[in-house]
Each structure stands twice: as structure tokens, then as C-alpha cells.
């Protein structure tokens, strides 16, 4: 008797139903016990060992008062364009789409694209920048750091050449 595909598929299906559902319970080991109860100890090379900190290394910590921001910004005190005393190398800069880096000055209005989250310098103190007043943030444009009012976009201060 020859079986065609029409009769073979229902036959395989019926046999699968008779076999019952697949079992999901853990099987006991010969000699008793749950399989997870008898896990072998990890190989000695796989166990982590203590690692002391490097000698003479002190991790960079935020200076005291790094985020105690002045309540107001006196434009006469901040309104300057400075040349940075040091240059930092932190990686490539990619300007906002459709824009190119340029030399900004205080008093100008920085377009919103430049003070988006990816250009904010939240760790400004690492680059020797002053604590920004409330409502202002440091942003990067090319090699420069710009202190901008996040409500209006007005530039309060510029540090040229902060980044290499």
C-alpha cells in the first residue's frame, strides 16, 4: 500500500497527538537529585581575582561645587571671547546637518541645531570652563566652547581653541 502526501500528513499529526505534549520538567539524574544541585565548581582560571587600582592613578572627580550655578548672569562679567589656555583632544566633531563650524562671538544668537543634546558639554569642568549660570549651557562648535542661553540661543561667552 502506497501512502501519498495527503494521507501521510494526517498520520504524522495523529501520531504526534498520541505521543502527548512535550515534557518541560527537569529529569532526575541517576542516583537522585535535581540536575542543578550538582553543578561542578568553575575552572580556577574562570574565577575572577581581585584587581587593585593602578598605582599613582587618581580618577578624575568633579571639583567641589561644580554644579552650583550662579542664579543670574551678568553680561559684563561673562561677555568675552577668550583664547583657551589649554587644548583638549576628545574626538571628532560633526556639525549639525546643513551647518559648518564657524567663529562665533558673544552677543550673537546660536541656531538651535548647535545646542542640541549631542553638542552639550555637561562635563565642562574637565575642560577648564566656568560654571554656567542657571539657564545657560556650554556647547561645542568645532574647536570652540560656547556658553549659550538655552531659552534664547544668545551667546554669553566663547572660548576659542578648547578642542584639537
Image: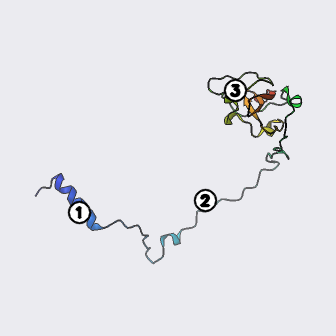
**Residue 40, quarter of the rendered image:** bottom right
**Residue 52, quarter of the rendered image:** bottom right
- Mark identifier at residue 14: 1
What's the residue at 76%, 21% (across, down)?
Answer: 103
Whole-angstrom CA distance, mark 3 to mark 1, is 71 Å
Q: Is residue 17 visible?
A: yes
Looking at the image, what colour scheme do you see? rainbow
What's the residue at 23%, 59% (across, down)?
Answer: 12
The crowding category of the residue bearing disc 1, from other C-alpha atoms within 10 Å (few below 14, some 14 to 19, many at least 20), is few
Mark 3, residue position: 111
Please tell me whether mark 3 sits on a helix, a strand or a loop: loop
The crowding category of the residue bearing disc 3, from other C-alpha atoms within 10 Å (few below 14, some 14 to 19, many at least 20), is few
Earlier-in-chain disc, 2 versus 3: 2
Point out residue 46 in the picture as x, y percentages from the top left corner. Answer: 61, 59
* On screen, residue 131 above or below 58: above
Earlier-in-chain disc, 1 versus 2: 1
Please tell me whether mark 2 sits on a helix, a strand or a loop: helix
Please identify, in this view, whether the residue under mark 2 or under mark 3 is nearer the observer: 3
| CB under 8 Å between discs 3 and 1 | no
| CB under 8 Å between discs 2 and 3 | no
Mark 2, residue position: 46
**Residue 118, quarter of the rendered image:** top right
Amino acid at each position: 500500500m502506497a501512502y501519498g502526501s495527503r494521507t501521510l500528513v494526517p498520520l504524522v499529526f495523529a501520531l504526534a497527538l498520541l505521543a502527548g505534549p512535550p515534557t518541560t520538567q527537569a529529569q532526575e539524574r541517576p542516583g537522585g537529585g535535581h540536575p542543578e544541585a550538582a553543578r561542578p565548581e568553575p575552572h580556577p582560571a574562570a574565577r575572577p581575582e581581585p584587581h587593585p587600582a593602578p598605582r599613582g592613578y587618581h580618577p578624575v572627580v568633579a571639583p567641589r561645587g561644580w554644579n552650583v550655578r550662579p542664579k543670574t548672569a551678568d553680561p559684563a562679567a561673562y561677555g568675552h571671547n577668550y583664547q583657551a589656555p589649554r587644548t583638549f583632544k576628545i574626538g571628532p566633531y560633526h556639525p549639525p546637518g546643513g551647518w559648518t563650524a564657524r567663529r562665533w562671538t558673544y552677543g550673537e544668537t546660536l541656531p538651535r541645531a548647535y545646542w542640541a543634546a549631542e553638542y552639550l558639554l555637561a562635563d565642562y569642568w574637565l575642560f577648564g570652563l566656568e560654571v554656567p549660570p542657571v539657564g545657560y549651557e556650554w556647547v561645542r562648535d568645532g574647536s570652540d566652547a560656547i556658553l549659550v542661553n538655552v531659552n534664547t540661543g544668545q551667546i554669553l561667552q566663547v572660548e576659542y581653541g578648547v578642542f584639537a
